[in-house]
Amino acid sequence: MVICANELPLPMLKRAVAASALVSLILGLSAVSAQGSVSFCIYGSGSCPACVQLKKFLMEEFGPEALKFNEVYGNETNAEKLALIYDLAFPNLPAHERYIPVTGVFCSGRLVAVVLGVPELDESFWRLLASQRDGILLVLHNGTTIRSEDQRLISSLEEIFGGAPSPTIPTTRTASEVLIPVTTAALADSVNPCTFSVFTALLLLSMSVGGKRRSLSVGGAFIAAVFMAYYALGLGLIRVFSSLPWLKYAVAVLGLAVGSYEVVTSLGGRFKSPLPDPLYRTTSRLVEWTSHAASVPLAFCAGLLISVTLLPCSSGPYLVATSLLAGLPRYKRLALLGMYNTIFVAPLVLILLVVGLLERRVRDVKVWRSKRLHVMNLVAGSLLIAICLWALLVS
């Protein structure tokens, strides 16, 4: 008989002590070892809440291709394999403590740990388990850890688990490693001439209708909408890249083409918008309509719509950045995505402050921007090329 792990809760103190001991042990074992690639093979059931929770967690943190799930209820072969894993890895475990899920943790194709139940739902806990080591860790549901260097046991367990799922996800990528390239992509996106043109036109027209104070309200609503729209878009893109990791290379190649186009068109001292004519006309009508209405709610809605119509002009850096973020744990993705979009809208906020606090005319900002569109495009294209080369050669 197998038992779903979350049906037998442990005292909090015992769990905390056991988890701390496990983490300390793993840190000591992995301090001098390099990490490879990590993947998981779970024996469990879709009717077991703990199994479903662990499966969802590992897929979100490491990607669906890093996980293989074997249903034991109604599948005699998998049930027999699960019983054999218990007999080999935990021979002295009473029948009433044979919980599911049972998870094999692989590093660079080698089985490095077998976990009974769900001791922790923490990304660092599972990543530490996946560190390269001599031997294998056998982890009970309460955090108790047994280390074995029995190669016959390891080989037998590897055979039962059927080897590591393929392809596997690299574990060497950290937030600090992608911080500079993601920031570079954000800077390239922040000087996007298309967004500058739309925003200054919006301020200029709304000021002529509703005055400076009204134009500041309209501009603030517009910026908030752009930030929210791009953040939501980024979350969707990250999910796509998490499911299709190979897609980031195609995006990097596309980014090189876009960046090269921006550089070439800027060298002659001119700026050529990549927006197709239908999108350009749609964007212009939205700006004009919103400006004449001088309505804050309408400006917010226009910001959401214009964020979509400007995608052909500004999507290059964002696609590259989100492809890099897809390899990070969830909370780090969210934080760096927020940083990216803050950098992206920073120039728009600066324009708003210049207009409002320094009482400079919007028309002066528009003239300054018009004379430097090609320079901004050149900078954006150069930064995009740099980040794409990094993605292709380093990642």
Image: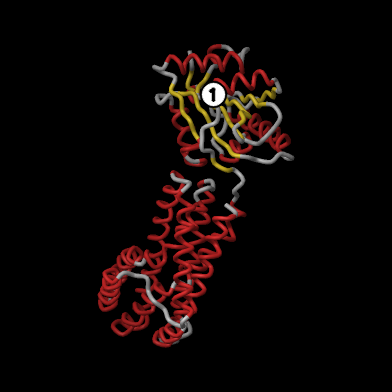
Which residue in the protein does label 1 denote? 161
Q: Position of residue 48 (x, y in %)?
A: 43, 24
Task: Give the mark count.
Answer: 1
Q: Which colour scheme is used?
A: secondary structure
**Residue sitting at x 38%, y 79%:** 200
Residues 24 and 390: in front is 390
Residues 341 and 3: in front is 341
**Residue sitting at x 39%, y 17%:** 74
Q: Position of residue 58 (x, y in %)?
A: 50, 36
Q: In this view, does 269 lie above or below 337?
A: below
Q: Where is residue 55 in the image (x, y as percent from the top left)?
A: 47, 33
Residues 116 and 377: in front is 377
Q: In this view, does 17 lie above or below 269?
A: above
Q: In this view, does 124 lie above or below 269?
A: above
Looking at the rendered structure, the secondary structure element under dot 1 is: helix
Task: Locate residue 220 relative to residue 31 in the image: left or right.
Answer: left
Q: Mark 1: which amino acid?
A: Phe
Q: Quadrant of residue 221?
A: bottom left
Task: Locate residue 160 relative to residue 290 in the image: left or right.
Answer: right
Q: Position of residue 277 (x, y in %)?
A: 28, 72
Label 1 environment density (alpha carbons within 10 Å; few <14, some 14–19, many ≥20):
many
**Residue sitting at x 44%, y 62%:** 316
